[in-house]
């Protein structure tokens, strides 16, 4: 069943761009409907592997911040 939905021109452009990127990735035509479905699929955290680029200094700073946060973490028992 097809349903008409009004969206802004900006959202239409964004969906069209996503559809184009998916066409390149999947090497087949991708409809706007498929692009919307792609946005709503649940993804695994491993899908993000390698997507965050940082240098050694940024990695060390990040790890240091995590260590500080975990030291402050306290659990309460019921």
Image (cartoon, rainbow, N blue to C red):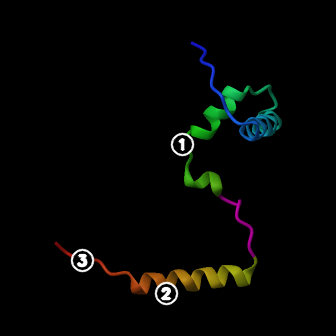
Residue at image location 80% in from the left, 25% down from the top: 29
Is the C-beta separation of discs 1 and 2 under 8 Å? no
Relative to 56, say whether 18 is above or below: above
Q: Which residues are magenta?
A: 49-54
Give whichever of discs 1 and 3 has the lower sequence position: 1
Whole-percent x and y of residue 72?
40, 86
The crowding category of the residue bearing disc 3, from other C-alpha atoms within 10 Å (few below 14, some 14 to 19, many at least 20), is few
Residue 46 is inside the magenta segment: no
Q: Which residue is mark 3?
A: 76
Name the element at disc 3: loop
**Label 1, label 3: how many angstroms apart (C-alpha)?**
32 Å
Residue at image location 72% in from the left, 84% down from the top: 57
Instruction: Name the side, left or right, on which 55 lies relative to 62.
Output: right
- Between residues 13 and 78, which one lies in front from this camera angle? 13
Predominant secondary structure in magenta? loop
Q: Which residue is mark 1?
A: 42
Give whichever of discs 2 and 3 has the lower sequence position: 2
**Label 2, label 3: how many angstroms apart (C-alpha)?**
19 Å
- Between residues 13 and 71, which one lies in front from this camera angle? 13
Is the C-beta separation of discs 2 and 3 under 8 Å? no
Whole-percent x and y of residue 77?
20, 75
């Amino acid at each position: 069943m097809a349903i008409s939905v009004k969206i802004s021109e900006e959202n239409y452009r964004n969906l069209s761009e996503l559809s184009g990127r998916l066409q390149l990735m999947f090497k087949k035509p991708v409809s706007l409907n498929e692009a919307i479905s792609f946005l709503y699929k649940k993804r695994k955290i491993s899908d993000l592997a390698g997507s965050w680029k940082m240098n050694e200094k940024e990695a060390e700073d990040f790890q240091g911040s995590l260590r500080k946060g975990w030291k402050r973490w306290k659990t309460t028992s019921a």
